[in-house]
Image (spheres, grey):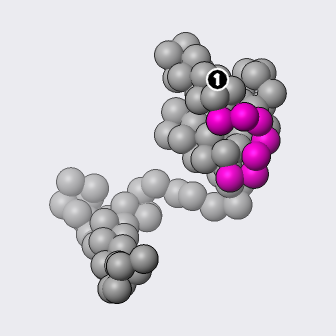
Amino acid sequence: MLNGFPEVISMVVDAICYTSYPQLGNKCLSDVVRFGQKEQQMIEEAARRLAAGTDPGIIPERFLIGASRFAFDNRLARPGVITDNFYKELSRR
């Protein structure tokens, strides 16, 4: 890993997530878009379903990326299967 790279990532995340924006009613992104344990559980369940080739259910499209990543990282299915099911589900929406 490049020297200083983790610090740069931290600064970028901090700037994007914890800076107030007029466009968001002077709120920061982390106040507007919630992500907690419930959302993580939804992603993990969707990952298992994507890997199995079943409908991942009604989850926000933005969670499909996290679900695919979780499925890859945990080797829930072959990468090609996860990729195919991801795109199939994304195009269905």
Residue at point 23%, 63% (across, down):
21
Toward the top, the furthest residue is 92
Residue at point 30%, 72% (across, down):
12
Instruction: Look at the magenta stretch and give its main secondary structure.
Output: loop
User: In the picture shown, does residue 53 fall above or below 13?
Assistant: above
Q: Amino acid at mark 1?
A: Asn
Q: Which residue is denoted by mark 1 in the rendering?
A: 85
Residue at point 37%, 61% (across, down):
29
Mark 1 surroundings: few (<14), some (14-19) or many (≥20) residues within 10 A: many
Q: Is residue 78 magenta?
A: yes
Left of 26 or right of it: where is 80?
right
- Magenta span: 73-79
Residue at point 31%, 66% (across, down):
16
User: In the picture shown, does residue 57 fall above or below 45?
Assistant: above
Left of 41 or right of it: where is 58?
left
Q: Is residue 90 magenta?
A: no
Q: Which quarter of the rendered picture does the N terminus lie within?
A: bottom left
User: In the picture shown, does residue 27 fall above or below 65?
Assistant: below
| Location of residue 37 by image quarter | bottom right
Q: Nearer the viewer, residue 58 or 75?
A: 75
